[in-house]
Image (cartoon, helix red, strand yellow):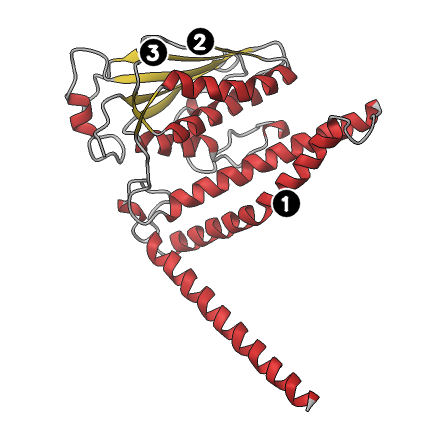
Amino acid sequence: MLEEHRQQLGERGRRGTENEEGSRSDAKSSRTDNFAALSTSVCGDLLPSRGQPEQEAHQRTMALAALAHEIKNPLAIVSAFVEFLLEQKAGPLTDHQRKILKEAHNGCLRLQRLTRDFLTYSALAAANGPFPVKFEMGDLNACLSELCEHWIPRFASKGVALFFQANPQIAPFRFDYHKVQQVVTNLLENALKFTSSGGSVWLTTEPHTWERFGSEGPHPQNVELREGRTNGPNAVRVTVADTGIGIAGEFHQEIFEDFFRIPGEKNEAFGAGLGLAISRRLVQLHGGKIWVESELGAGSKFSFLLPINQPAE
């Protein structure tokens, strides 16, 4: 009787495994089919159109995203415990212990940035149709002030000054609050990464008259947005400028490509090469554009434009 019961359980387990494998196969096939529509989606072409290699690249991206999702929560727990120990809530630390924990904390932060970038990138890559953008009337000054409050302690810990002053000329307009914060977060991360102790970073905003017409990017209303107002500011320019190491002119276009890292970057510039690529796509979803002005040894200035007359949803 016991042996019969074991056989029944074994048979159920095999059927369950077969069903699960079938479901995974169907899900994998569905993701592959969705990827075929990416070239016409609002996110733009995330990978070159090369048939089968393109599908394989997409599957690798999804696998990395799945891995990032799996380690996201355990990593957050480890980071929280390290912070708990650094604050000496479990008892006093020696200088050597504090140094080790700080290195561990910095490693956790780097991995958290990687997982965040992979998850965002995979969401853009897997979008079947227009990627959702939530345009709502908002205060850009408040949006950036909130972000700076989070970043100032991290800048201070490295000895880098972060400056931001609200611009009263920027009136409320329609934009995606959290996606704009993510764009600026990526730019501030890069500025902090490549600026030495004693340096400075400035976050500024200003009204901007965008004279360049035509369609650039996936926003369906690009032409209307830019041609509708030509007698005054029709966009807001957001700039992150730093006194860091700068970027050679030959890389000013490539740095916005997927997984690109400047040759010869030092190990402390750890990253997947996705931050600027994601920022470009998020700016394009607003109907805007992003670019860099920089020279080696003379710092960098990253700017992006946000149209201020987004149509009501």
The amino acid pointed to by label 2 is Gln
Marks 2, 3: nearer the viewer: 2
Q: Quadrant of the C terminus?
A: top left
Q: Are marks 1 and 3 in contact (CB under 8 Å)?
A: no
Instruction: Work out whether 289 lies above or below 8.
Output: above
Q: Secondary structure at mark 3?
A: strand
Asked which quadrant contains residue 256, the reply is: top left
Q: Earlier in the sequence, mark 2 or mark 3?
A: 2
Query: Which residue position holds label 3?
Result: 206
Q: CA distance from mark 1 to mark 2?
A: 37 Å
Residue 184 appears in the figure? yes
- 29 vs 72, left or right, is left
Provide residue 179's location: percent of width, then percent of height: 40, 31
The amino acid pointed to by label 1 is Pro
Numbered badge on residue 165: 2
Mark 1, other Cα within 10 Å: few <14 / some 14–19 / many ≥20: few
- 180 vs 69, left or right, is left
Q: Residue at (47%, 48%) from the top-left corner?
A: 61
In front here: 13 or 184?
Answer: 13
Query: Which residue position holds label 1?
Result: 74
Q: Residue at (59%, 44%) from the top-left corner?
A: 73
Mark 3, other Cα within 10 Å: few <14 / some 14–19 / many ≥20: some
Q: Earlier in the sequence, mark 1 or mark 2?
A: 1
Q: Secondary structure at mark 2?
A: loop
